[in-house]
Amino acid sequence: MNTSLQVDSPTPFRSALEARGVSRRQFVKFCGLMASTLALPHRYAHAISKAMEQVKRPVLVWLEFQDCTGNSESMLRSGSPNVGDIVIEMLSWEYHEVIMAGSGQHASDALERVVRECAGEYICVVEGSIPMAENGVYCTIGGRTALDIARQVCANAAVNIAIGACAWDGGIVSASPNPTGAVGLQEAVPGIKNLINLGGCPHNPVNTAAVLVHYLTFHELPALDQYRRPLFAYGNVIHDQCERRAHYDAGRYVQEWGDEGARKGWCLYKMGCKGPEATYNCPTVRWNEGTSWPVKAGHGCIACASHRFWDTKSPFYDRLPTVPGFGVDVKAEDIGWTATAVIAGATALQVGANMVRDRLKPPPADSDTHEPTNTSA
């Protein structure tokens, strides 16, 4: 981590990666992962690779406010291909309290220099909530409030990324009763440009890398939803992507931790899984080099990427009241018999309707079945 401003890489990007032990094969694999994560055809991996090798390294500053540093840890502990190493080489990280060499006034000077010399060009990542109560005194850095820093730094950035639940909507810090008046970046600094929210507790570093790669490759942010979250990561319901979904549809549920259903990997709906109401790409991107994710590991989804999930999705072990579709307390054979009964009932109803229609239908004008006319006196 530098404490002096350095916009351009002193060595070619590929050479810098090799110096960090990232092979060409790992880099190509990384580009393929980015294309897949962004829901792009695999052929875009080549375009991403070419863009990354030619990109002028933009400056990045990473602000830490009211948080547990979990999102920084998540990024730095990413696995193979080493997302952390590649992203660090893609960008000139000039300020990040957790990993930078400088401290105190030297660190503050580095941040001020970026804002002054790269205004409108740098990328700003915000981790943690921003307290609003008492004019923001509950979080101060170098004698300045987090609110003051965010207003200055984010207002001059080309792109702002609110990373993790706390930076997005206040997270656990803003959960009731919220004594510090903590809010997310969007509420603390309304109207900031090019904002993207990456909810999650913590965020998934693959999604963060994908957002950065998309921006550096196409010079624009990916498509966003109503919460300004990227659709490629938050556009699908977890329940529909879950490997346990078949057990839900068949009515096979874990009834208590450690039972037979838990050992067999049955659905965790009755244990409070919020997957049917949550959107995220956890089931496909996963964690620990794509090895697993909470539901696969045996714990229900707590919807950590949902808006204000600490308040709206808790208690985490209470099951959802209703879920559309089959499942809940319905067994597979019940689904079959119900479907058969519905079809039979519909068939009978149609037959009855046809009979009534035929009885009410008037006879044709030239029909021989009409009554003869009485001609007697």
Image (cartoon, rainbow, N blue to C red):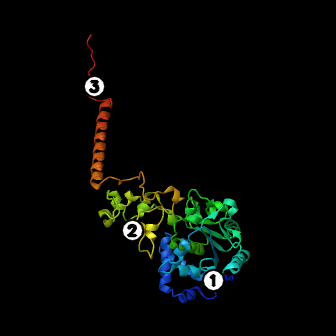
Q: Mark 2 or mark 1, which is nearer the start of the sequence?
A: 1
Q: x and y percent of residue 281 in the render?
A: 47, 66
Residue named by callout 3 = 370
Q: Nearer the viewer, residue 146 or 376?
A: 146
Say which residue label 1 marks: 101
Q: What secondary structure is found at the residue carrying circle 1? A: loop
Going by the image, does 293 lie left or right of 47?
left
| Residue at which label 2 appears | 296
What residue is rendered at 51% in x and 71% in y? 204
Looking at the image, can residue 356 be seen?
yes
Sequence-first tag of 3 and 1: 1
User: Gap in Å between the C-alphas at discs 3 and 2?
Assistant: 74 Å
* Residue lying at 66% horizontally and 70% vertically, measured from the top left: 158
The CA distance from mark 3 to mark 1 is 104 Å
Q: Quadrant of the C terminus?
A: top left
Dot 1 and dot 2 residues touching (CB under 8 Å): no
Give the number of the mark in front: 3 or 1. Answer: 1
Q: Secondary structure at mark 2?
A: helix
Left or right of 340? Residue 164 is: right
Any part of residue 228 in sight: no
Left or right of 108: which side holds 354?
Answer: left
In front of the other: 112 or 353: 112
Q: Position of residue 330 (x, y in %)?
A: 32, 52
Circle 3: residue type: His
Amino acid carrying label 1: it is Ala
Nearest to viewer (mark 3 / mark 2) = 2
The image shows residue 349, relative to residue 23, as above or below, that is above
